[in-house]
Image (tube, rainbow, N blue to C red):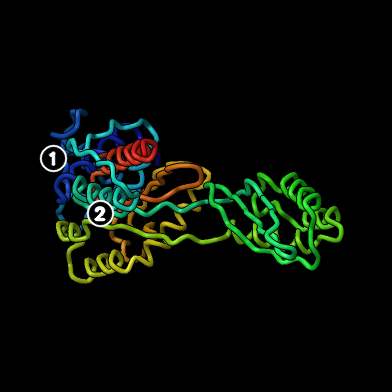
Amino acid sequence: MDLDERKIKILTAVIKTYLETGEPVGSRTISKYTDLKLSSATIRNEMADLEEMGYILQPHTSSGRIPTDKGYRFYVDSLMETKEKEIEDMKEVVLEKADKLSEVLKQAAKLLAANTNYAAMVSTPEIHRNKLKFIQLSRVDENSILAVIVVEGNIIKNKMIQTEAPLDDDTILKLNLLLNTHLNGLSLEKINLGLITLLKEKAGIHTDVVSSVIDAVADAIRADENLEIYTSGANNIFKYPELADNERASDIINTFEEKKQLEKMVTERLMEDSAEKNGIQVYIGSEAPVPAMKDCSVVTATYELGEGMRGTVGIIGPKRMDYEKVMGTIKKLMDQLDMIYKST
């Protein structure tokens, strides 16, 4: 059974009403809420169909209905697919320019929590240096060469390479040309065995130098940066009865304090989002990437500050969160982060 226009309007009315009140929604409430001009009996029949289809459920006999995860999923997908929502201004609060990015991100987490009344997190940007940009070899002394490797994000890594015999300037120039001609712009996956074999053949007696440089390139691309996550508003969880019991709230707050699971979520989110910049992802209930948040909704987005510099912002709240406001607030924040970064 497909959702026709009437069922979609009734489902949307149930979800929006429940988001506002946190109470099961009855047919009489919906009859006043919608513009369908239907009787309570007709609405009850439609709600029964929606319940059979798994979009809503009746938590107690003789009570109204509340959305299921499937219902929330339909609502969120419709919200994101049909049109871009107007971004709600953040109560005229503007992020002040800070000397350090970390201070800006700490402030951003506080603003997210204050403007949504949910828990918020912002990660420092990871440098996704998937591709090599440039290699520069230069002689330090008779048997030492310095390899300067530049990868995406303009990250520079240095490696000292020992040689068995001295290399003259002409040889170093030829090695620079050989390496840059074949390797520039390549990701680690494309630096395969065939290419390495070709480079060693062309390097002749200097294959050891080529091997050392390629090892250094791999290390530079793979190198991990210290990931920091700034959080705020964890105590907002206690404002929502469905999350406020001791066990649930304790699990969520511990997750915010320990941050290990948040770091894992951020890393996975950035990997998933590498092909789609600045995408917003909504996890509802059991879809949540962190076990402690299985009763929550988690909204995340990837911000980008420059070439290869990406981080994650996230909002964690009840499944009846105000999705429109959360998405708008996150988009506004990403715009502000971009503006602050470009102006510094």
Q: Which x, y percent locates residue 270?
A: 46, 52
For the N terminus, the quadrant is: top left
* Residue at point 43%, 41% (across, down): 278
Q: Disc 2 residue type?
A: Gly
Q: Is residue 288 left or right of residue 199?
A: left
Q: Residue furthest bottom?
A: 247
For label 2, the SS is strand
Q: Disc 1 residue type?
A: Thr
Q: Which residue is mark 2?
A: 317
* Residue at point 76%, 61% (across, down): 209
Q: Which x, y percent locates residue 263?
A: 40, 62
Q: Is residue 230 left or right of residue 204?
A: left
For label 1, the SS is helix
Q: Which residue is mark 1?
A: 29
Q: Is residue 121 left or right of residue 134?
A: left
* Residue at point 27%, 69% (across, down): 254
In this view, the mark in front (2 or 1) = 2
